[in-house]
Amino acid sequence: MTAATSSPGTARSAAAQRRIARGTAVVGAMALNAVLWGIASLLGADFVLTDSTGTGAVTLPVAVIFTAIFGLLGWGTLALLERFTARAVAIWTGLAVAVALLSIVPIFLEGASTATRVALTVLHLAVAAVLVPAFRRTRTAR
């Protein structure tokens, strides 16, 4: 085999490394959000949100679970795009940044303390700051 081709084992190995790197990024974003949630809570954020349907709290488990869900959705979206286009990473990056920025809007539509609004904004941006560069680094070669 030449340097331009790879064996099936090498392709599987690269795919496995990509899955490990992306999975690690999701777990890392979850851990970072847990730490940031704890710090914000210690600094006075109560994570209580109020809207027309009532009042609810963003607890630590809720924050971590939502981080996992949206991290996995981002990963799945990137993997799907990689199957259909060579521009997958560029498309996914634009989509991920748009989703991250749009996810902040509802924070300011809810009734919440300033500390809670700041903390939730930081949590949302922290997830993007971890996942976007990590997923970009793991792009598939075409």
Image (tube, rainbow, N blue to C red):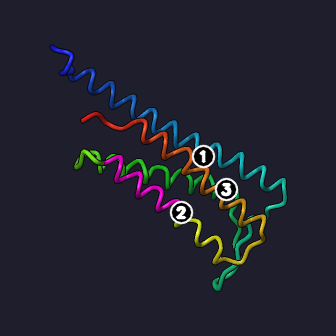
Q: Which residue is mark 2?
A: 101
116 in relation to 20, above or below: below
The crowd level at tag 3 (other Cα within 10 Å; few <14, some 14-19, many 20+) is some
Instruction: Tell me the CA gap for discs 3 and 1.
Output: 13 Å
Instruction: Tell me the CA gap for discs 3 and 2.
Output: 11 Å
Given residues 96 and 28, the one toward you in this image is: 96
State the mark number for residue 100. none
111 in relation to 123, above or below: below
Indicate the position of residue 12 as horizontal and vertical percent values: 29, 27
Q: Is residue 51 left or right of residue 38?
A: left
Magenta stretch holds residue 31: no
Q: Which residue is mark 3?
A: 122
Q: Which residues are magenta?
A: 88-100
For numbered disc 2, what is the local secondary structure?
Answer: helix
Q: Which residue is mark 1?
A: 30
Indicate the position of residue 13 as horizontal and vertical percent values: 33, 24
**Between disc 1 and disc 2, whose residue precedes?**
1
